[in-house]
Image: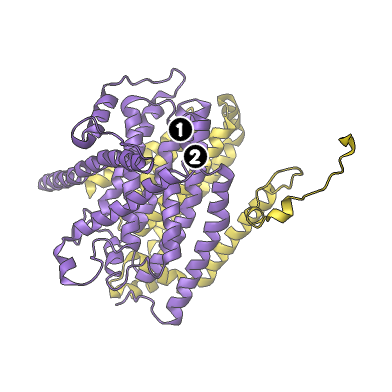
């Protein structure tokens, strides 16, 4: 347990440092993925196997793939990044400070975070997955639905932004192709032969 | 200090179990390539490999030796570290998922609670082997192949996810052993037949097999994402692809064909040990993979995307709705408190 904890934790921290210090943006994304995978390992060690798998499926399997796509396609040069680091240094520092203070507050008030309701349900020896499901879909049902709606709005927005109708694009309509009959497409015409003689 | 040694012994025992799984698996992969050539030959009225060994049975080993002894060529403009890392990632990921597959009752390395999610996570990770290879090769064919492959795998993962949700609704557990045990009275491919078909077709697309082998479209992209690879690095992609095929077939067996359970609950069927039933079912599904490859022409890319997003996604989503409604209406929902 201890051995694996130090293994995962040290790789997570080191790859997180490598994310911000490596020169190639694609390498940064790959290190970010390594950090995700190792923090999933930490979740497993903490006994939260469901969260670990969801972290892998959602962040590594979907979000990071798109991220990698964008970084590969944009082909960002090193100079641009260096200029941007100067531009965004103070705002980045501010966000980092806010996160740090929030983390400090939540760690100093651990009792407030631990919800007593959850402990009451857990006396039936259920698995993590069942517990998360029962808490999320009963006690926090409306909040959960609301977050789903926010994601739906974002998705519709992305589709609206990229949807363009262009003229002259050939599209395949399979039902049209299949329902095509001989009489729709072939027509017999009697042509008068003028040059017969 | 004692604690450390106990951990060390534990790690060593687990490693030996791992070798017990990986060894036979690699032999299966070798013979799957042989089987593929024989099946396709039979479909096309040819003989297939028949020179090396009896009935050509040693052909896969001859191929292996050939690949071993070839020179590893790394393109000058390639990103060397990622170029070498990519086939390793894809090979390792195709082996890692086997740790949770129950071959028979109690015959499983790690009987974890979230087994099915683990397999799903590993299969979504295996995209990285492809995309890293495509990017690191620094070649347009490899890059196009990788982009196609990634888009394809992400799209078909969605429908596979909904198919799995259908099965999980009937089981009430994410544990693979529980999923098999829930099929004691009726294998799930009977009540969920449309989802079984969707699963098989999505599995073809997920493993980049014909008719969805667009990532390695020979006629357009040379060999797709592994165009620049040679020797053992190529062999690793190859082994990874075939091992992913066997994995998908085992997953299909566990989800729909009742895993190691005999077809009927009679004594005669029970004489045959469970793992043999498992192998027979996996073999049947693998035959479907090869049969489809020998029969169907390749899809066009837009047809592939249309099938994934416009047909399979709505169909599987609808079927999740139907399954949930039927289970609630007839009060058949599995009880976690049970």
Chain rendered yellow: A
Residue B309 pos. (x, y %): 56, 54
Q: Quadrant of the C terminus of chain A?
A: top right
Whichever of labels 2 and 1 marks the residue nearer the N terminus, that label is: 2
Residue B185 at least partly seen: yes
Q: Position of residue B272 (x, y in %)?
A: 16, 61
**Marks 2, 1: nearer the viewer:** 2
State whether residue A9 appears in this view.
no
Q: Which chain letter matches label 2? A: B
Question: In the rendered view, would you say B315 is above or below B36?
Answer: below
A175 relative position to A38: left or right: right
Q: Tell me residue B256's x, y (percent).
A: 35, 62
Residue to which mark 2 is pinned: B214
Residue A73 found in image quarter: top right
Most foreground residue, B68 or B290: B290
> At x 20% / y 45%, what residue is drawn?
B18
Frontmost residue, B77 versus B203 = B203
Q: Which residue is mark 1?
A: B225
Q: Is residue B25 above or below residue B317?
A: above
Note the chain letter of the purple one: B
Task: Quadrant for residue B85, please give it.
Answer: top left
Q: In this rendering, would A190 be left or right of B93?
A: right
| B331 is higher (above) or lower (below) than A36 | below
């Amino acid at each position: 347990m201890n051995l694996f904890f130090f293994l995962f934790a040290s790789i997570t921290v080191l790859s997180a440092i490598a994310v911000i210090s490596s020169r190639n943006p694609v390498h940064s994304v790959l290190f970010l993925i390594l950090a995700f995978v190792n923090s999933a390992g930490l979740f497993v060690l903490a006994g939260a196997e469901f969260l670990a798998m969801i972290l892998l499926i959602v962040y590594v399997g979907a979000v990071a793939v798109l991220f990698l796509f964008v970084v590969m396609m944009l082909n960002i040069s090193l100079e641009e990044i260096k200029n941007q680091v100067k531009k965004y240094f103070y705002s980045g520092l501010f966000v980092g400070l806010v996160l740090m203070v929030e983390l400090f507050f939540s760690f100093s008030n651990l009792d407030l975070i631990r919800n007593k309701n959850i402990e009451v349900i857990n006396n039936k020896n259920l698995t993590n997955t069942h517990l998360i499901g029962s808490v999320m879909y009963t006690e926090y049902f409306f909040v959960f639905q609301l977050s789903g709606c926010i994601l739906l709005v974002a998705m519709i927005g992305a589709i609206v932004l990229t949807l363009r109708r262009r003229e002259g694009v050939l599209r395949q309509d399979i039902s049209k192709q299949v329902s095509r009959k001989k009489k729709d497409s072939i027509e017999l015409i009697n042509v008068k032969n003028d040059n017969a003689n | 200090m004692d604690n450390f040694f106990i951990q060390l012994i534990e790690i060593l025992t687990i490693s030996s179990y791992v070798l017990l799984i990986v060894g036979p698996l690699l032999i299966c992969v070798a013979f799957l390539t042989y089987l593929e050539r024989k099946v396709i030959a039979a479909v096309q009225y040819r003989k297939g490999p028949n020179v090396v060994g009896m009935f050509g049975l040693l052909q896969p080993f001859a191929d292996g030796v050939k690949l071993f002894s070839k020179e590893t060529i790394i393109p000058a403009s390639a990103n060397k570290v990622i170029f070498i890392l990519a086939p390793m990632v894809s090979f390792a990921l195709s082996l890692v998922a086997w740790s949770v597959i129950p071959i028979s009752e109690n015959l499983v390395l790690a009987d974890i609670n979230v087994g099915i999610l683990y397999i799903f996570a590993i299969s979504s990770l295996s995209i990285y082997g492809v995309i890293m290879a495509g990017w690191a090769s620094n070649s347009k064919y490899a890059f196009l192949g990788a982009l196609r492959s990634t888009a394809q795998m992400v799209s078909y993962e969605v429908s596979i996810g909904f198919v799995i949700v259908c099965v999980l609704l009937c089981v009430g557990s994410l544990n693979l052993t529980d999923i098999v045990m829930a099929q004691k009275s009726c294998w799930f491919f009977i009540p969920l037949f449309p989802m079984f078909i969707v699963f098989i077709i999505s599995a073809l697309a997920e493993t980049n097999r014909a008719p969805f082998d667009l990532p390695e479209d020979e006629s357009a992209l040379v060999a797709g994402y592994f165009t620049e690879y040679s020797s053992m690095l190529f062999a690793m992609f190859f082994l990874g692809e075939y091992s992913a095929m066997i994995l998908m077939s085992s997953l299909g067996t566990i989800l729909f064909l009742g895993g190691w359970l005999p077809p009927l609950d009679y004594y005669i069927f029970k004489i045959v040990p469970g793992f043999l039933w498992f192998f027979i079912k996996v073999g049947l599904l693998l035959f479907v993979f090869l049969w489809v490859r020998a029969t169907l022409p390749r899809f066009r890319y837009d047809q592939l995307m249309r099938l994934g997003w416009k047909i399979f996604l709505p169909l599987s989503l609808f079927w999740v709705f139907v399954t949930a409604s039927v289970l609630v209406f007839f009060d058949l929902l599995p009880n976690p408190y049970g």
